[in-house]
Image (cartoon, rainbow, N blue to C red):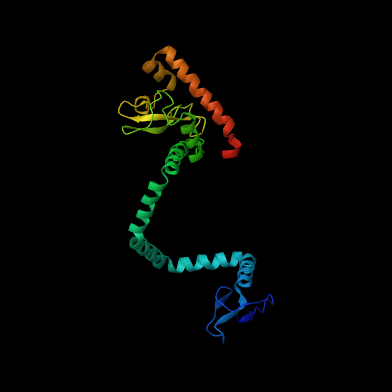
Amino acid sequence: MTLKLCTRCNRELPATTEFFSREKSRRDGLYNYCKECCSAYLSQYRARNADALREKKREYYNEHAERICLNLRTSYANSAEIIKERARKYKRDNPTQVKAYLLNRLARKRALPAFFTAAHWQEAVSYFEGKCAVCGRPAGLWHTLAADHWVPISSPECPGTVPTNMVPLCHGIGGCNNSKHNKPAGAWLVETFGPRKARAIEARVQEFFQHMAKRFPQEEVA
């Protein structure tokens, strides 16, 4: 194998484009510095001249703003369908992550804590064995499991989209999530199941929140 000497680090490396960038003006068609040295040099140069480079970039943008914006719009228009299909595919392949993102976004809009993750949701579903935390109905053909804010997001007492406020409730015709909506959990439980059963359900949910607090301390997920 032909070797080439990097004139910066003085190492002999294979004379291929894996180790050296192309340079037409050179006899062998390869730059004299290896790629590793070039990368290190550029990083140092950018660090030494950060302010000047930023100013130069700003000046270039101001001078060519209209053309840059036009190019970006054209590029987006040409790639719009590809971008949309990628987004659709991500949603299909990562429904749990998308669910967590939307729930957190809802809390952030109200300036509430928001650090509910896909891992928290999986733990909640596992804790209740894939069933509704209230009525025990499993997810199936007619019902799904929805991540419900136990203290409604519209309530001034809502702690946010956090592991200790999210429970899996059945969603569908006659589902607990549909029935509860944004009602206070305690009043809704009594109205739907009666005082005695409501107390038992509330105790079960609170035990679950204690489990989540121990399983996912806030400092680990905030």
Q: Quadrant of the C terminus?
A: top right
Q: Nearer the viewer, residue 144 or 40?
A: 144
- Judge from the rendering whether residue 15 lies leftward or rightward of residue 148; answer left or right: right
- Residue 74's spot in the image, x, y percent? 35, 64
Give the residue furthest to the top.
Answer: 196
Q: What residue is rendered at 40% in x and 16% in y?
A: 190
Does residue 15 appear in this view? yes
Give the residue furthest to the right.
Answer: 10
Q: What residue is rendered at 37% in x and 64% in y?
A: 75
State how many labels appear: 0
- Residue 72's spot in the image, x, y percent? 39, 63
Give the residue furthest to the bottom.
Answer: 27
- Residue 211's spot in the image, x, y percent? 55, 28
The answer to whether residue 100 is above or below residue 6 is: above
- Residue 157's spot in the image, x, y percent? 49, 26
The answer to whether residue 19 is above or below residue 122 is: below
Q: Quadrant of the N terminus?
A: bottom right
Quadrant hosting residue 175: top left
Q: Nearer the viewer, residue 120 or 107?
A: 120
Q: Nearer the viewer, residue 22 or 16?
A: 16
The answer to whether residue 33 is above or below residue 176 is: below
